Amino acid sequence: MDYTIFNDELNLIENESIKNFTLEALKIAPKYFFDVPSSVSGKYHPYCNNGKYGLIMHTKLCVNAGKEIFDNPLLINELANKPALTKLEEDICISSILIHDICKYGTNDTIEAGSKSRKDHPILAGEILKNSSSLKNLLDSNIKSTIVKCVERHTGPWVNDRNGNKILEEPKHYLEKIVHLMDYFGSRKDLMDSSLNRFFVNNNIPTNSSNINFINANEQ
């Protein structure tokens, strides 16, 4: 499994510079990103996200959530004080959400079994986006800065580490808030999109047996 699993989502991005930047960021993501669960505790994510390829599933669900948010003028008006985002703004949001969790379990290519997600993973991802040589000069500096901030602030109000120390910043700009909501809605257990389950089944992409049983049970 690699970055090509996100071809459908990348093709939603019309701005070629943003698309290329996002693609290159996915290429340098730690290798575990394409293999691991989105949550090992099962507390905060749909059931099917908690097995193999779960982080891919979660990321796709977040993009689906974003498309629904973009289409809701009441919600966009509340956040952005206008009825719709520009296509460039939508592209920025999709780019940000595709790469928001690339460092969910740290920056090494492999992780130990049972590893917990890193509370500072938004900052780790932001550092890669800012400092990787392969990502330099691919994007207008203002657009890149906006994407980095969206990634670094995607956890919304949950900004503390496990000891209660504040380590992250809450979203301020409306695009940062929208990316947070994409992540939030994409991780709600009761909002799981069964069509995404069919994507994995129809493309013969294996997950662990509990996930397959769960998917099949809900397709009957």
Image (cartoon, rainbow, N blue to C red):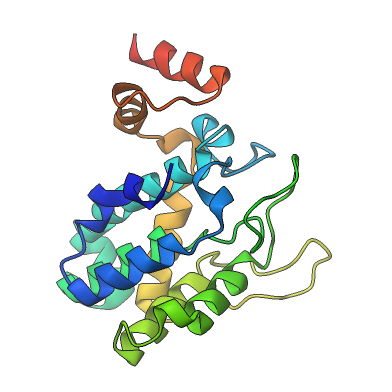
Quadrant in the picture for residue 170? bottom right
Decide which of 175, 30 is in the foreground and name it. 30
Q: Residue at x 28, y 70 (%)?
A: 20
Q: Residue at x 60, y 57 (%)?
A: 104
- Left/right placement of residue 78 relative to residue 163 reads left
- Left/right placement of residue 39 relative to residue 17 reads right
Rendering coords of residue 191 (x, y %) = 41, 37
Q: Residue at x 79, y 61 (%)?
A: 162
- Left/right placement of residue 130 relative to residue 191 reads right
Rendering coords of residue 97 (x, y %) = 40, 61
For residue 171, say whether it is visible.
Answer: no
Vertical side of 113 occupied by 133: above or below: below
Which residue extends farthest right? 163
Rendering coords of residue 100 (x, y %) = 48, 63
Rendering coords of residue 62 (x, y %) = 39, 51
Q: Residue at x 75, y 45 (%)?
A: 112
Which residue extends farthest top? 220
Which residue extends farthest bottom? 141
**The C terminus - image quarter:** top left
For residue 59, say whether it is visible.
Answer: yes
Decide which of 115, 77 is in the foreground and name it. 115
Which residue extends farthest front? 134
Vertical side of 154 occupied by 167: above or below: below
Quadrant in the picture for residue 80? bottom left
